[in-house]
Amino acid sequence: MTKNLIIKKIALSKSPNSINYGIKTKTEEFTEKLFFTLFDNHADLEESIDALEVLFKDISVVACKKPQQKCDAVWKAFLEKLPTVLEQLNQDARYILENDPASNNVEEVYLAYPGFYAIAIYRLSHELYLLDMLLFSRLMSEYAHRITGTDIHAGASIASPFFIDHATGIVIGETTVIAKHVKIYQGVTLGALSVSKDMKNSKRHPTVEEDVCIYANATILGGETTIGKNSIVGGNSWVTRSIPEGSVVSNTTTTDIKIKENIQK
């Protein structure tokens, strides 16, 4: 098979949709620049915001499905949200510092905590989601997913302060609602009981009320499932129905421990 024939076959097999892969790398660049602008005290804010605007509008050429005038207005609406989002993230960072004995100072949280990074990109992409920039928000979410191992859909509703520890393997679905002062550990899934396409516009994911702690690898499923406030969900638990306020949920599987010397006898 000649090179020209191979090229022809690839061209014929490509998706008929207009896919511009450059939007993905530009979104990643935008995400890093945005994080730097908000958290690096040496960032020249005017210069950084001007650079962000250029990137945003480049991405919007592909990601915004509205008339040009409305697409241009989205940047201004997003920019106006940044001070409020930053206040929420500063609150999240302090909450992480207060609740993780391994954290030494808030600078460490900003610089080295994948859970904080995942929360930050969620809060920023959530504003784009609310502005109907769905592809843009999804690309930001997936970048954070790749970097941190945490998959938070931009459509989820998560109050501040919020705590994620270790981050790896966490999945939070699009219609999840999380109240303030919730703590989540690695491997937790807040997911749907059904993945039927006709449920797209319905609440498919759980609600977690205030002051709940969800330990590692717990799975909580279903749009009607509510974890009542002040509850604890133990590690490896499987929850598909609502839990009353003040509950403790535990996995009843037991692990036997025997002394090696007794086994040998």
Image: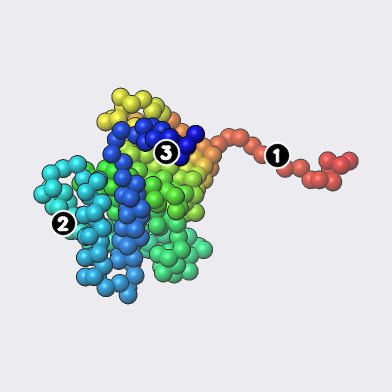
Which residue is drawn at the image coordinates 51% and 63% (left, top)?
102
Q: Residues within 10 Å of mark 3 (few under 14, many from 20)?
A: few
Vertical relation: 183 (above or below) 263 = below
Decide: marks 2, 3 in contact (CB < 8 A)?
A: no
Residue 93 location (% of width, % of height) = 38, 62
Whether residue 174 is visible here, answered yes or no, is: yes
For mark 1, what is the residue? 256
Q: What secondary structure is found at the residue carrying circle 2?
A: helix
| Residue situated in front as seen by the camera: 220 or 197 | 197
Residue 202 location (% of width, % of height) = 28, 30
Look at the image and name its color scheme.
rainbow
For mark 3, what is the residue? 4
Residue 9's disc is none
What kind of residue is marked 2? Lys
What kind of residue is marked 1? Asp
Of tags 2 and 1, the one toward the viewer is 2
Residue 259 location (% of width, % of height) = 79, 45
Whether residue 137 is visible here, answered yes or no, is: no
Of tags 1 and 3, the one toward the viewer is 3
Q: What secondary structure is found at the residue carrying circle 3?
A: helix
Residue 127 location (% of width, % of height) = 25, 50
Vertical relation: 16 (above or below) 170 = above
For mark 2, what is the residue? 76
Name the outermost residue toward the bottom. 42
Q: Quadrant of the C terminus?
A: top right
Decide: marks 1, 3 in contact (CB < 8 A)?
A: no
Which residue is drawn at the image coordinates 58% and 35% (left, top)?
252
Q: Which of marks 3 and 2 precedes in the sequence?
A: 3
What kind of residue is marked 3? Asn
